[in-house]
Image (cartoon, helix red, strand yellow):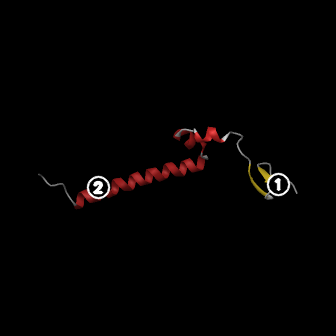
Amino acid sequence: MSNPPNRTVNPQRGTSGPVSSGKPAREIRNRSLWGSYEALPRRTRLYFGVGIGLVGAVGLYVSDQLEDKYPASNA
């Protein structure tokens, strides 16, 4: 039985895990926010963007409803 090409077997635990990218941990820790975003899979970035857009749209709708319900007083 052979291992899938993107998995390695840990001889101490006998379990398989994803192969590391080969980058030292230091480079990952020093990654910028944009670099971390770009490292996400495409689908995750899509879901993240759609989620941010939905939160913004709901916020605009709710603020309009609250403005209609509680109009600003002319002070």
Tell me where residue 60 appears, x and y as whole percent.
34, 53
Q: How many marks?
A: 2
- Tag 2 near tag 1, CB within 8 Å: no
What residue is rendered at 77% in x and 56% in y?
16
Q: Nearer the viewer, residue 61 or 55?
A: 55
Badge 1 element: loop
Q: What type is the residue that disc 2 sits on?
A: Asp
Give the left or right position of residue 56, taking residue 11 as reference: left
Where 35 sits versus 41, above or below? above
Tell me where residue 55 appears, x and y as whole percent.
42, 54
Tell me where residue 1 appears, x and y as whole percent.
88, 57
Report crowding for label 2: few under 14, some 14 to 19, many 20 or more residues within 10 A (C-alpha): few
**Mark identifier at residue 33:** none
Tell me where residue 33 appears, x and y as whole percent.
52, 41
Badge 2 element: helix
Q: What type is the residue that disc 1 sits on?
A: Pro
Give the left or right position of residue 53, taking residue 5 as reference: left
Q: Which residue is mark 2?
A: 64
Residue extending furthest toward the left: 75
Q: Which of pointers 2 and 1 indicates the residue nearer the eye?
A: 1
Give how far apart the Cα atoms at labels 2 and 1 are: 60 Å
Residue extending furthest toward the front: 12
Q: Which residue is mark 1?
A: 11
What residue is rendered at 62% in x and 38% in y?
27
Report crowding for label 1: few under 14, some 14 to 19, many 20 or more residues within 10 A (C-alpha): few
Residue extending furthest toward the bottom: 69
What residue is rendered at 59% in x and 46% in y?
40
What residue is rendered at 23% in x and 61% in y?
69
Give the left or right position of residue 18, taking residue 71 as reference: right
User: Which of marks 1 and 2 precedes in the sequence?
Assistant: 1
Choose top left, top right, bottom left or bottom right for residue 12.
bottom right
Q: Nearer the viewer, residue 72 or 64?
A: 72
